[in-house]
Amino acid sequence: MHFSLPLLALGASLVAAVPSLEVKGNAFVNPKTGDRFQIVGMAYQPGGSAGYQPDKKKDPLSDKDHCLRDAALMQILGVNTIRVYNLDPNLNHDACASIFNAAGMYMLIDVNSPLVGESISSWEPWTSYYAAYLNRTFAIVEAFKSYPNLLGFFSGNEVISAEKDAEFVPRYIRAVTRDLKNYIAKHADRAIPVGYSAADVRDVLMDSFNFFTCAENGDATDPSRGDMFALNSYSWCGNSDFTKSQYDQLVKNFTGTSVPVFFSEYGCNEVKPRVFTEVGALYSDKMTPVLSGGVVYEFAQEPNNYGLVDIHDDGSADILADFYTLKNQYAKIDSKTIQATKPSSSSPKPPTCDSKLIKEAGFDKNFTIPVLPPGAKEIIDNGVKPAPVGKIIKIDDYTVKYKVKNPDGTELQGLAVKPLADDQSNTPGSNSPSGTSGNGNASSTGSSSSPTQSKKNAALGKREMAASGVGILALTAAAFFGLLI
């Protein structure tokens, strides 16, 4: 599969920091360098489900100043990808998309939302699969397809969280994947990957993977086949290890896959403070040949206590201790090495869809994908009307306008997004404003605490946004390395 770089009419003063990526076999690949791309990602949905309010013209990528603040903070960490869950296709996202682009960050976008009519139901999926629903998912495609830093779309998020959900849902998720890919093929200037974000529930995980990534007659161009597969994994808690966390089993299960596989969420909080020692494993040579990185859950603090930054109603923010713990773990990543490996020269062929791929008795074995609902073919043929339009725009000032404080109460000085040079993605050390030194004091070893929720709940029920089931003015490099001493 080839992903061509779109032509954008950018002014000389604009920064096109990241090239659109290609999928080659089981890897995301930079088409200019030929290097494999590892996701160093952050889940980004400030306000949880309340951060998406179409009636108030509000979503996570609709406020320029908020995006400047958050992109600047994520640059400090070294984040190169954000995942955004609930978006309104009718809002203008140009400023935020341009800010994250300049900051060297890709976007993974969910096409669904928790609102009625904006997701596939996990109990009676046929009741939610209709033309108006598909029209909205296609509108999300229209709104984001022209941004070069768009990495891909998720056609569903944890819609299957137990075997009871798996009798009929898989074929409908696969139908949505087909419909999105057919719409993209007809209306976008480049191929854009579409995949599924799965719950890491072991009795349905591999069946989900096999169902969504197999191909009819083994044909890799089958449009209902996912281009990527992701899982929300919370099995590594505290100072776990490669075996205890069952990361070894994940590597075993996904070795030799025909599509990129990565963590669409990780970061267990059953042991506090979080230590993020799984970062070292995820970006080690044990895992990078098989997985393409992962997305930490999550940027903004919510009642579930997974956040790294506490955002206030006036736009100011307090950095939490976990932020600096994660920063210190990211700083240990050998970014130059992991982002410069080459993909396999031979791409594994997808397996042919067959009921023998499915192991659990209650999991869908019917690979006959539902036909388009009435009216949907006309939308795919003619496009969404009126179609949202997105484009990279010039940002005149990258300075953050809100106060941001460290865990000790000191204020960050000179906080701003640092636009990167062409074709660069963000890495640890890209941006180090004054005031970050001396604040990485979160303990590097976690102490056990009474879990606030079970591992199963951590993986399945931790966030409001998935209730539907879809669901920096830089200093010198020397200053940054001084922070690590």
Image: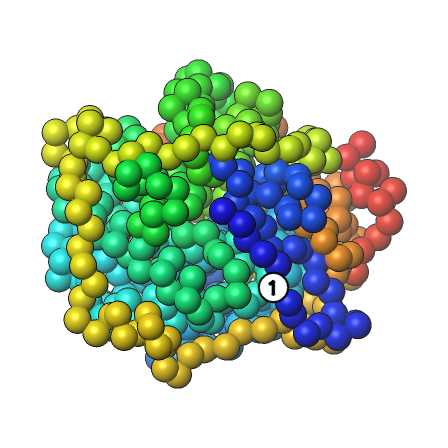
- In the rendered structure, the answer to whether residue 408 lies left or right of residue 208 reads right
**Residue placed farthest to the bottom in the image?**
386
Name the residue located 45 percent from the left edge and 77 percent from the top edge.
388
**Count the marks: how many?**
1
Q: Position of residue 328 (x, y in %)?
A: 66, 35
Name the residue located 12 percent from the left edge and 34 percent from the top edge.
362
Q: Position of residue 199 (x, y in %)?
A: 32, 39
Viewer can see residue 48: no
- In the rendered structure, the answer to whether residue 239 lies left or right of residue 392 reads left
Quarter-of-image position of residue 331: top right
Viewer can see residue 34: yes
> Where is mark 1, residue-wise?
6
Look at the image and tell me in which quarter the C terminus lies.
top right
The relative height of residue 66 versus residue 85 in the rendered view (above or below) is: below
Please tell me how crowded label 1 is: few (under 14), some (14-19), or many (20+) other residues with Cα within 10 Å: some
Q: Position of residue 380 (x, y in %)?
A: 32, 70
